[in-house]
Amino acid sequence: MTIGITDLTEGRVDGHGVYDDLMKIVSEHLQAEFKKNRITGTDYAKVYVESLQAVLAQSVNFLLQKDLIAAQILKVEADILQTTAQTSLIGQQEVNVIADTKNKGQQFLKLVEETTLVTKQQAQVDQAIQLSIAQEGTANAQTSLIGAQELKLTTVDTDQVTAQTANVAKDTLLKTGQISKVAQETLLTAESIVTQEAQQGLITAQTANQGQQTTNLVTTEANLVKTGLKTNAEVSLLDQRTVTELAQTQTGTVSGVIGKENEVRSAQITGFERKAISDAASVVAQGFSVARVSDPDNVSTTDFGYTNSRNEAIMAKLQAGL
């Protein structure tokens, strides 16, 4: 906010600028003391000039500090709001990370189940291979038996033996095809196991990365909490400075060093008032004394208004002031 000259003074005695208002109060105090003869002409001018300078300096300082302190308080409040928003965002990110980690865990369990199933399938394939090998041995044994029978049964019909040999050959080819199919299935199963293991490694790495992200977010949240505590301390310090600055420009009961300074100033003003009364009485007495001594025949007490009743009034004034 821009500070204009009218904020300081409107250029007239009855203005409403900060300087105008403070000078009204100072002038009223000085007039009251002067009317009570507690401040002489020379002292009045000195006190007035000093008061004018002090009030002008304090007025300018008040205007400069007022908007600055207000702006600083607004900035601190904005920083607090930003810190709160960041903390909420981090909290939401933590919830997302936890949910994602849980999802990855479920995927990992599913992969373990699939790996177990593949292992069972591998065992079944091994059993099929062993069975095929056993069947192949049986076929070879049958072939050897047929050969022996061919040697022994020379009287058997050649066509029948040839047909049996053909059947054995077909059975052998069939068993060989089954063995080849089982071998292909075994190869596919091995490739599937390798793929599952690679996926399991990838999920493990992702899970570790999510854990590190969670740790980083927790650390960031702790730092933001520390920043929020520091910001609260700065706001408290600004509040204390505001009380101190206002105490220098506003009236009222104030404790601390400034309160003691105000008490000293009040005591000084009282001293000035009492000194003015005493000086006024001294001037009257000295004037009468000099005139009376210089010309005792022509100077009477009434010339200076120095009567018993007047003297009693002056003494009563002195006693009231003291």
Image (cartoon, grey):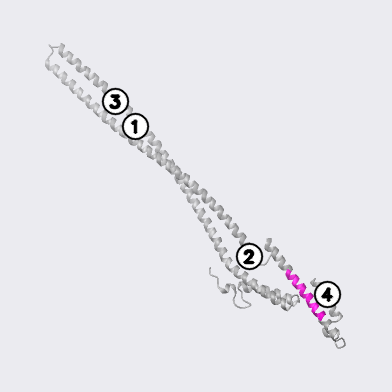
**Residue type at mark 2?**
Leu
Q: Is residue 155 above or below residue 299?
A: above
Classify residue 10 by image quadrant: bottom right
Comes first in the chain, label 3 or label 2: 3
Classify residue 263 by image quadrant: bottom right
Q: At 20% across and 22% down in the image, what residue appears? A: 172
Q: At 58% across and 69% down in the image, what residue appears? A: 63
Q: Is residue 281 magenta?
A: yes
Q: Is 100 placed left or right of 155 in the picture?
A: right
- The residue labelled by disc 3 is 128
Q: Nearer the viewer, mark 1 or mark 4?
A: 4
The local secondary structure at tag 2 comes to helix
Q: Disc 1 versus disc 3: distance between alpha carbons?
A: 15 Å
Q: Nearer the viewer, mark 3 or mark 2?
A: 2
Would you say residue 24 is visible in this rendering? Answer: no
- The residue labelled by disc 4 is 316
Comes first in the chain, label 3 or label 4: 3
Q: Disc 3 versus disc 2: distance between alpha carbons?
A: 97 Å
Q: Is residue 222 magenta?
A: no
Q: Nearer the viewer, residue 176 or 269?
A: 269
Magenta span of residues: 268-286
- Give how far across and how far down residue 60 sits, in percent: 60, 70
**Residue type at mark 4?**
Ala
- The residue labelled by disc 2 is 246
Residue 118: image tag:
1
Q: Nearer the viewer, mark 1 or mark 2?
A: 2
